[in-house]
Every structure is written in structure tokens, then in C-alpha cells.
Image (cartoon, grey):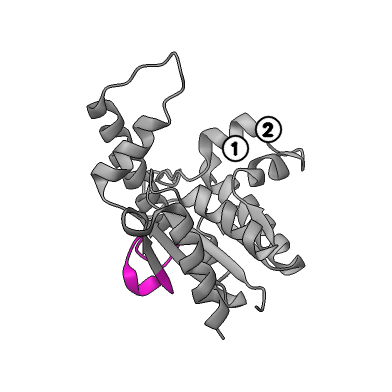
Amino acid sequence: MEKKIITISRQFGSGGHEVGMKLAQKLGVKFYDKELVDMLAKDGKYNADFIEANEEKCSPPMCPVMPGFSMPVFYQDLPSDLIYKGQSKLIRTLAERGPCVVVGRCADYILRNMNPVNCFVYGSLEARVDRKMSMIPEGLSFTREEIKKRVIDVDKKRAKYHEFYTDNRWGRMEDYDLCVNTDKVGIEGAVETIAAYVEHCK
């Protein structure tokens, strides 16, 4: 199998991180998800806490309008802009080094000129809530409604972030090479499905 660059976009709770990690192991390529936070922090410009607090978020630009002017007089990058630019450069650099699997962070758009295989991992809301409920650490307690709200809110933020920084609509079928429902095939099935698809990609 020719090794390729693969991006994984995912609904919250669909298991996209685990799918990406196991896919990278199966294909024998590098895997990047939260590792990107530590790698970017090593540059010294931002610490890991700052990156985690501001990545995959977006806010309106700080463009004050001065009296007598109809347009903003300057543009100031927000923390989310700085993180996006830093991660974009890092993701391109890592992809240039060789085949890899990258989860989230608009990698499908950032690497669009490198012919990646772009996948979207999704599932029903109820199944994703079930998955997140099963992952609650011992000693913590959340209601099903609280987890459901969290799942919905994270998806909304991911969609807003993706659409703010790219030309694509997050989750739209036409913008991906392959969409996989983990309700139907599970994590292992999703890994096998994507691997089989990649094997036949030109």
C-alpha cells in the first residue's frame, strides 16, 4: 500500500481520535492530534495551556472603526488567529516530512495542495453521548443531558472554526473523500474501512 497523508475530521464523541491513532499504527505512519500542542509549544512562542485554551476557536477580528472612517483602520490578530497560523505552518512542515494521519485543526484545508485523503468520522447523537458517558473519569459525575449539551456545543464550535478559517462547510459530504459512521462499523471497522479506501486511492 502506498503511504499517504490522511486527515480525520470528526464529530465530538464519534471516536475520531482513536480511529486516527489506530489507523496510523496500522499504516505505519506518524500520528498527530494533541501532539501538535506540545510540538507548537516547544517553539517557545506560546505555552501548552495557552494553545489548548485558544485552538479550534474563532472570534471576530479586532478591527476598531475610527471616527470619520467607514472601514477599520487596522487588524489585530486574536489568540485563535495566532494559534491557527502556527499550527498551519507546523502541520505543513510535518506533512512534507512524510506520510501521516492528522486529526482536526482544518488539516484537510491546510494540506489541500498535497493531495491528502480527507475523511469525516461521525455518528448519531445518542451513540456519541453514550460513548462520552462511558469515558467519564471515576469520581466525576455528569448527567446525560449535561454530556449531550457538551457534545452539541463542541460540534458547533468545530463547525464555526472550520468555516471561519476555510472555504468549506464542516461535515459537508462533498468536501471529504470518505465519510464513516462509527455507529455502524465501530472503531476497528472504521480503521479497516479507511485503510481499504486509502489502498485504492490514486
Front residue of this view, candidates 6 and 113: 6
Residue plotted at (25% across, 28% down): 144
Residue plotted at (54% across, 61% down): 107
Residue assigned mark 1: 51
**Is 41 included in the stretch rendered in magenta?**
no
Q: Position of residue 98 (x, y in %)?
A: 73, 68
Q: Is residue 67 above or below residue 199?
A: above
Q: Residue furthest bottom?
A: 202
State which quarter of the image contains the N terminus: bottom right
Residue plotted at (26% across, 34% down): 148
Residue 65 placement, left or right of 46:
left
Residue 34 appearing in the image: yes
Q: What number is the disc on residue 47?
A: 2
- The overriding secondary structure of the stretch rendered in magenta is loop
* Residue count near mark 1 (Cα–Cα under 10 Å), binned few <14, some 14–19, many ≥20: many
**Residue type of the residue flagged with mark 1:** Ile
- Whether label 2 touches label 1, CB < 8 Å: yes
Q: Position of residue 118 (x, y in %)?
A: 49, 69
Residue 100 placement, left or right of 180:
right
Residue 176 appearing in the image: no
SS at badge 2: loop
Front residue of this view, candidates 74 and 89: 89
Q: CA distance from mark 2 to mark 1?
A: 6 Å
* Residue count near mark 2 (Cα–Cα under 10 Å), binned few <14, some 14–19, many ≥20: some
Q: Position of residue 42 (x, y in %)?
A: 76, 40
Residue 145 placement, left or right of 52:
left
Q: Is residue 169 above or below residue 129?
A: below
Q: Is residue 158 above or below residue 89?
A: above
| Magenta span | 166-178
**Residue type of the residue flagged with mark 2:** Asn
